[in-house]
Image (tube, rainbow, N blue to C red):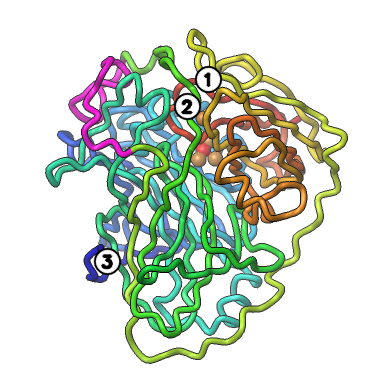
Amino acid sequence: MLPMESAVAPPRVALADVRRLVVERTDPIAGRCRYVTDLGARQVPQPILLARRGESFDGVIENALPQPTTVHFHGLTLPEAQDGAGFDAIAPGARKSVRFEVKNRSGLYWFHPHPHGFTAEQVYAGLTGLLVVTDEDDDALDAALALAPGNRLALAIADARVVGGAMRPYAPSVEDCLHGWLGNRALVNGQLDAAWIVRPGWVRLQILNTCNARGLLVAFRGGETLVPFHLLGTDGGLLAAPRELDRVFLYTGERVDIGIDLRGRRALVAVSLEFDPRHHTGGAAPRHRHAARKRYAPLAAGTVCESASGAAEGRLEDGAELALFALRVDGTPMRTPPLPSRLSVLPEPAAQPEAPTRRMRLDFDERAGFLIDQAPYRADEIAFSVSRGTREVWEIKNSPISMPHPMHLHGFGFRVLRRQGTYGDARRLATEPGGRLATDLGVKDTVVLWPNETVWLAMDFTLPQEVAFRGAQRFMFHCHNLEHEDGMMMRNFSVI
Ligand code: C2O
Ligand code: CU
Ligand code: CU
């Protein structure tokens, strides 16, 4: 059982008020890092940023790390120059001015480093920030739920290797670079054993999986039983209608928006339930050579993907049960109105799976590593181009001898049309038409492909008619298992 103190709420800062965002290392031994902004004379570490749809960011990003970095706003539709995708990393000691407008629907978005070859290490070091975007749909939902102040939480769940009370620095072995770097303890908004006090009534949780590699099967235990909850939204905002569930898969980079009726409950423990992640890939991932890695030292004292055995101490296998955080229910009961039956209007995707525009395969090869369409990442390559404004259907097939790959598209939300070849625990949760899971009903920017699965995605490459979006724009499509991403499971494409 987790302790029941209330966690310190991270400071909330309006995106529009941020003038400087500093990326800094706070602990050279363990290699811990953080984002800091300032509000007047006050330094605010690891802020949760808040924005109304249509608001802008206009600030300077300062890199105080000893490595190159970028700030990528995951899920937002941004021009290439503001996307922070790693094409133009900020050198140590350098700064970059960034200006953009938030075009996306309300939802939980986030920001993290994306400098190729350093992403996994920097995210594990603590560089994850949340961005909560609101709009009228979002306001209407909070009002309909009569949410108490404090009953809406934005939570970033990471996993850390904690041994003897200390957090292990990032030093993956060859094995870790194959399956991903897995920790043994959940860090929620940077805290171990996180717990929040909430009032009886509705609670709304917007949850991000920011683990490097661990998939989560999120559920809530109230004593011996699982407490039912309502799925309200996914990566790119609210669903059309809520879905009642008792567990939900949340892979790295994905978000869920959840409502729980806490009436009559004293405490809940959020856990990741045990599941079979179906890692079928044996052997070893080849060592990938990033030219830049030779020029910059690791954030902590350690090596990256080099030791054959490595210290597996503090590694908890993917799919093992893991306690995440606790909610203690306290205070005067709130009014608990019925959940609204409509949450938002989602345009039906026009495209149909019968006519895929593009087919892609995900593979693993012991010599070449993780592959999208038989090719490892090349920074200077454009794998394909799409015309702006077009709609496409992508058919993506994961090899049967494989592992789950949470595939992420920059810049554009998409819809999941159909799944085929799903086995294991995901199969049992595929309750929706087309073999889909409840989370497939929303707008997504990251979708997990289980081994042997084929998914069909409806893409819409419409870009805003603005100067900033003129000309060819490069975007990325990659696996959000960060060891796979740094291991070249990524492609560039261009929208022209
Ligand atoms: Cu969350 Cu390309 O990343
Ligand atoms: Cu992204
Ligand atoms: Cu992967």
Q: Which residue lies furthest to the top in this view?
A: 367
Which label belongs to residue 313?
none
68 sits to left or right of 338 = left
Which label belongs to residue 484?
2
In the image, what residue type sits under mark 3?
Ala
Residue segment shown in magenta: 295-316
Secondary structure, mark 2, is helix
- Residue that appears at 71% across and 73% down: 342
Secondary structure, mark 3, is loop
Asked if residue 260 shows in the view, the reply is yes
Is residue 24 inside the magenta stretch?
no
- Residue that appears at 77% across and 29% down: 386
- Rendering coords of residue 437 (x, y %): 65, 51
Q: Residues within 10 Å of mark 2 (few under 14, many from 20)?
A: many
Is residue 312 inside the magenta stretch?
yes
- Rendering coords of residue 318 (x, y %): 40, 38
Q: Where, by quadrant of the figure, is residue 340 drawn?
A: bottom right
* Quadrant occupied by the C terminus: top right
> Compared to 449, does 42 lie above or below?
below
First in sequence: mark 3 vs mark 2: 3
Label 3: which residue? 7
383 sits to left or right of 10 = right
Look at the numbered disc 2 and say if its residue's Cβ is closer than 8 Å to ligand 3: yes
